[in-house]
Image: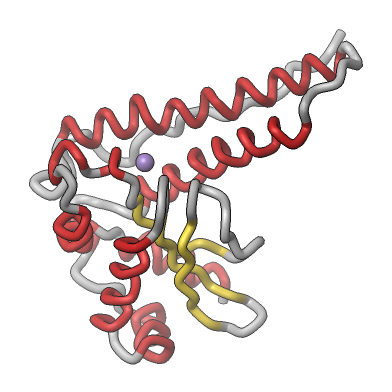
Amino acid sequence: MSKIRKLYELPSLPYSYESLEPYISREQLRIHYEIHHKAYVDGANKILQMMDEARRENRSFDVKAALKVLSFNIGGHVLHSIYWNSMAPKSRGGDRPGGRLEDKIVEDFGSLDRFKQEFTEAALTVEGSGWAALTYCRQTGRLIIMQIEKHNTNVYPMFQILLVVDAFEHAYYIDYRNDRKKYLENWWNIVNWGFTAERYERLL
Ligand code: MN
């Protein structure tokens, strides 16, 4: 009897659909989560199950194609999971990171505003189903901004992601149409700095 193997699951949202209003509408959040995020979970599981089955029956499959689709979907799933936690209702998220994370941002970027400018530019200019992420490099002890294209390319392997923003159109088109800049400006109102700071603190 073969063991039941674990698959990816859509995690529950850490707040209700209307919590991020007026910056992200109930409908925008609901569709993004229920349809788009779920599609990555289903897409990753489909490939995992296909590979499980092929291995069980000792059949070959197109490894290159499967791994590409798998990485696209796992990347989408993991990044969306971080994205939901990268936001919080305005009353909970706080206006600034504070503490050691803020000190580190100021040390590495010059000021919080300068960091926000660079992070926004990274999100504005990333291509495709793209993301901007704040990461921490253990080797140099630096905070480094990462652009992630198609959920998985240009990634610095093993760098801990501290904060991400989804810059793909599906994240904002209902509320902002093609105005990615406005979405990103407003996004800063709902950043969950507590979450980001906690992830940073855990590395120290
Ligand atoms: Mn998305």
170 sits left or right of 159 in the view? left
Q: Position of residue 101 (x, y in %)?
A: 40, 78
56 sits left or right of 10 in the view? right
Residue 2, placed above or below residue 42: above
Residue 108, placed above or below residue 144: below
Image quarter of residue 12: top left
Q: Nearer the viewer, residue 99 or 121?
A: 121
Residue at point 45%, 26% (across, down):
39
Q: Position of residue 48 (x, y in %)?
A: 69, 25
149 sits left or right of 175 in the view? right
- For ligand 1, which image quadrant applies? top left
Image quarter of residue 62: top right
Residue at point 40%, 69% (across, down):
197
Residue at point 57%, 54% (across, down):
153
| Colour treatment of the image | secondary structure
Residue, far top:
1
Q: Nearer the viewer, residue 17 or 63?
A: 63
Where is the C terminus found, in terms of image quarters? Answer: bottom right
Residue, far left:
22
